[in-house]
């Protein structure tokens, strides 16, 4: 379900919190690549029983931030994001994706 949410920090336009995708602008819902990216996060969240996804996401972000010292680089280095960015253009990715595939990007 797509929900309009105007209060994103700069540069961010969408966020997935299963079962909702929050978007900064309603036109974003037509961006197939971006919606696919968020759906990959849906899958990651469900297979980690939701709460562990956010715990792992934040923990990995803090580790990456210590490594890279840059917010954007840290964010892009999170395994969940690496998987989502790598396969966001592949419409069939989720059909064939194996359980916990984000681990390939750790
Ligand atoms: Zn993402």
Image (cartoon, rainbow, N blue to C red):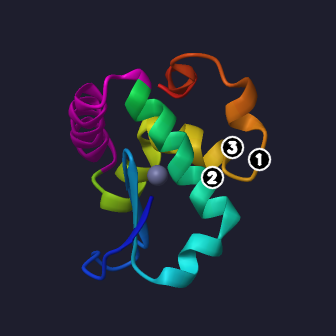
Circle nearer the N terminus (3, 2): 2
Q: Which mark is residue 91?
A: 1
Quick check: 38 left or right of 7?
right
Instruction: Give above or below for 7 relative to 86.
Output: below
The kind of secondary structure element at disc 3 is helix
Numbered mark located on residue 87 in the image: 3
**Residue density around tag 1, few if under 14, some if 14–19, many if 20 or more, within 10 Å:** few
> What is the distance, in whole Å, between disc 2 and disc 1 at their CAs?
7 Å
Q: CA distance from mark 3 to mark 1?
A: 8 Å
SS type, badge 1 = loop
Q: Is residue 62 magenta?
A: yes
The reply, left or right, for residue 90 in relation to residue 13 is right
User: Does the residue at mark 2 contact the one at mark 1 (Cβ under 8 Å)?
Assistant: yes
| Quadrant location, the N terminus | bottom left
Q: Secondary structure at mark 2?
A: helix
Place of residue 61 in the rendered image (x, y in percent of width and height, measured from the top left): 28, 42
> Residue 63: x, y in percent?
25, 35
**Which quadrant of the view contains residue 11?**
bottom left
Between 39 and 79, which is closer to the camera in this rendering? 39
As displayed, is residue 31 above or below residue 97? below
In-image side of 35 versus 91 (left or right): left
Mark number for residue 36? Answer: 2
- How far apart, in angstroms, are the residues tagged by discs 3 and 2? 8 Å
User: Of marks 2 and 1, which one's residue comes earlier in the chain?
Assistant: 2
Residue 92 belongs to the span the image colors magenta: no
Q: Is residue 87 above or below residue 71?
A: above
- At which x and y percent is residue 97? 67, 25
Give the label, 3 or 1, closer to the camera: 1
Residue 78 placement: quadrant? top left
Residue that protrudes farthest toward the front in the picture: 1
């Amino acid at each position: 379900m797509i929900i309009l949410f105007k209060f994103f920090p700069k540069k961010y336009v969408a966020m997935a919190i299963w079962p909702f995708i929050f978007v900064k602008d309603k036109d974003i819902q037509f961006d197939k690549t971006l919606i696919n990216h968020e759906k990959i996060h849906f899958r990651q969240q469900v297979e980690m029983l939701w709460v562990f996804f956010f715990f792992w996401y934040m923990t990995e972000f803090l580790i990456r931030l210590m490594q890279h010292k840059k917010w954007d680089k840290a964010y892009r280095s999170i395994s969940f994001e690496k998987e989502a960015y790598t396969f966001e253009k592949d419409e069939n990715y989720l059909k064939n994706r194996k359980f916990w595939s984000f681990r390939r990007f750790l």
